Image: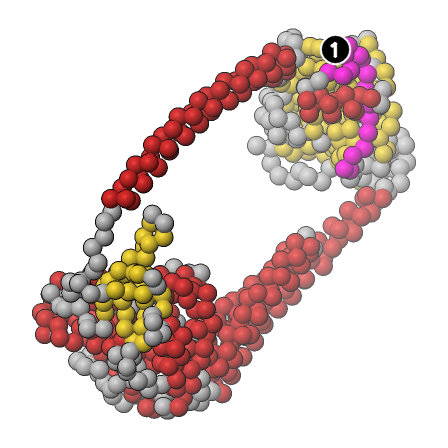
Amino acid sequence: MFSMNYGWISAALKLIMIRANFVVSVMSKVCSVALLTLVLFGLSLVGVHGGVCGEPNEYFYGAIDVDINILPNSDMDITETIKIVYTSGTFHYADRWIPMDRVESITGVEVWEGEREYGFNPKVRRWIAERKESGKALGGDSYAYATWVDGGKFWIGWWYPATSGGSRTFTIRYTVHGGLRIGEKDDQLYWKAVFKDHDVPIGRSRTTIHLPEGVYTEPLKAFSYGTAAERSMVDDRTIQFVTGVIPSHQELEVQVFFPHGIVSGTVPVWQADLERHEAYNAGVKPKVNLALVLLGVIALIAGGLWLWNVFRGRVRVPRSSFAPPMVYSPPDDLPPALVGLLTKNAVGANELVATIFDLAQKRVIAIAQAERKKFFFSSKDVMLSRSSGITKHSFERLVADALASGNGTWLSEQRGRLPELLRDFSSRVEQESVRQGLFQEEPSKSKGRLSKPGLFMLFVTPFVGIPLVLWLFERAEMIFVPFVSVLLVGLATIILSSKMPSVTEVGATQAGLWKGFGRYLKKMVKDKSLAVDNVSYWDSYFPYAVIFGLSKGWVTTFEGLGANAPAWFHVGAADSGSIEASGTSMPSLESVSSAFQSMVNSINSGFGSGGTSGGGGGGGGGGGGGGGGSAG
């Protein structure tokens, strides 16, 4: 290898380091000034908004009492008494929302605080939104409320002067129309008295239900769901539920049945929709789910029968009459790529790398490793050059012509064309296997009969199934079963496609022999005494070691035995696009291993991959009311 003077590189590196230290020093000062500016700016923001951001707003509900008065016309007058205890921060508003899916309308809203009645002001909605977003108190010292409907929720929001510490007690009154469920025998109140959407605990709650006058021939049936509640009968027409502390995000839902005819209401629209939904769930949905499960089972059975028929229709694979457990020398001169196809039913990057080394062994190409310099950096690369040897098979000529030239070709510069090269290489190897009578047809065509339908099932089924499952899951929970069955059939199809290639009797015999030779090579890597006996064959066996995934251990084993590098491998220095090897010492096997890894990395990077083979009970949720509330 040419000796080189690195003095000018050392001087250049010192100059770069001096410049770099100067730049780092300047950047450190700039960053310090910028950081100080940001800190001062942040402090100024705290000074401006300290009342909002400096002290977090914390509160809890001291109590929420609900009074429900059922009117003879089936409306409900509801009064909520909400006590908010402020522990830190400054507050200006509170809000409350009620879902509209179990009511027809809500009217007659009033907001009181003691003897003070809040006036209606539509601006309250904007004041609350601005308060939540920026902390600004646009409403000032106003006492006002507003109502609005948004996203299927009926909102009640009210504004009050700044409050820090202490507590405030608000009374919210409203009338619910179409909130009762009307039945043939019984009517019922099903209402979430204490809403679930609260981020803070509630000290206690008392819910009182007043029924209208009428003839009650049977005892009232009353239930509660969610948080634990104690039920009591105040009188014949009044029921009360009392709770202790209610943790955050827990609700109290009450259900009371009373005789039909006590109230004069008609069936609300939402109830008719709900009853149709319940009738479907009770009668139709189980049958639909059963049918979907049966359809999934049928899909699995049909897929299994189809696979059985496909394998039954192919040409029967002959069994080799001679498949020794170990073969101590190559059974014949079959090229490594064909050996890989015979033993794995596939041609990949390993077969391409093994073919490169096999061509080098046959003196068709020469392999050289060199340090390529780019600016101040260098990296190892492999150059392939044409030699005087002659190729025997079309796939060998393809590799030699594509990757090597008379003046030498850098392998790293061929990455862009490697995927196309591998496809052409695989096709020619398969064609040669049929020409030599090893396979009855090209293995990729045999596998394609299963792999193509399998890929179609694996890719198309999710695109169709996922939207349908999301759309129809409420109507039939088992909607996913047929799609899962199709996916399982597709997966089985992909896995079994590798078993489709049909070898001839010659191919079966050759496959058994070469697998035995592969076991011998694996034993040679582990058994040092066996490797010593074969040290003179290490390079001629090397392409086959690559095929069987033994390349790294193979080189390491024979390097430890002092084996010489092959004559077709050189180490040199890159100069003007070529390699100068004069004056170098004999390359080591470590260099061969490094070159092999460099080739593997270059080839795999061309394909974008890496490496080679080597508390309150249940029932709730059906009633109206509930929703949420907050303060800020």
Is residue 106 or residue 431 the one in the foreground?
431
Where is residue 381 drawn, in percent x and y?
32, 61
- Please report the residue visible at 82 percent of the width from the left and 10 percent of the height from the top: 116
Q: Position of residue 48 (x, y in %)?
A: 64, 12
Q: Nearer the viewer, residue 121 or 361?
A: 361
Query: In the rendering, at what x and y percent does residue 591 appear?
Result: 22, 62
**SS class of the residue under badge 1?**
strand
In this view of the protein, can residue 503 be seen by the observer?
no
Question: On screen, 439 above or below 476?
Answer: below
> Is the residue 315 above or below the residue 426 in the image?
below
Tell me the quarter of the image containing the N terminus.
bottom left
Few, some or many residues within 10 Å of mark 1 (<14, 14–19, 20+): some
Taking the spot 42% from the left edge, 82% from the top edge, the residue there is: 428
Amino acid type at image mark 1: Pro
On the rendered structure, is 39 left or right of 439? right
Location of residue 263 by image quarter: top right
Q: Nearer the viewer, residue 584 or 596?
A: 584
- Number of numbered callouts drawn: 1
Seen at 33% across and 86% down, the residue is 392
Q: In which quarter of the image is the C terminus?
A: top right
Residue 11 vertical position relative to residue 465 in the rendered view, above or below: above
Q: Name the residue under label 1.
A: 161
**Residue 545 in sight in this render:** yes
Residue 607 placement: quadrant: bottom left
Judge by depth and name the residue closer to the eye, 396 or 223.
396
Rendering coords of residue 205 (x, y %): 67, 21
Q: In which quarter of the image is residue 426?
A: bottom left
Query: Residue sitting at 54 percent across and 70 percent down?
Result: 455
Q: What stretch is highlighted in magenta?
A: 137-152
- 241 in magenta: no
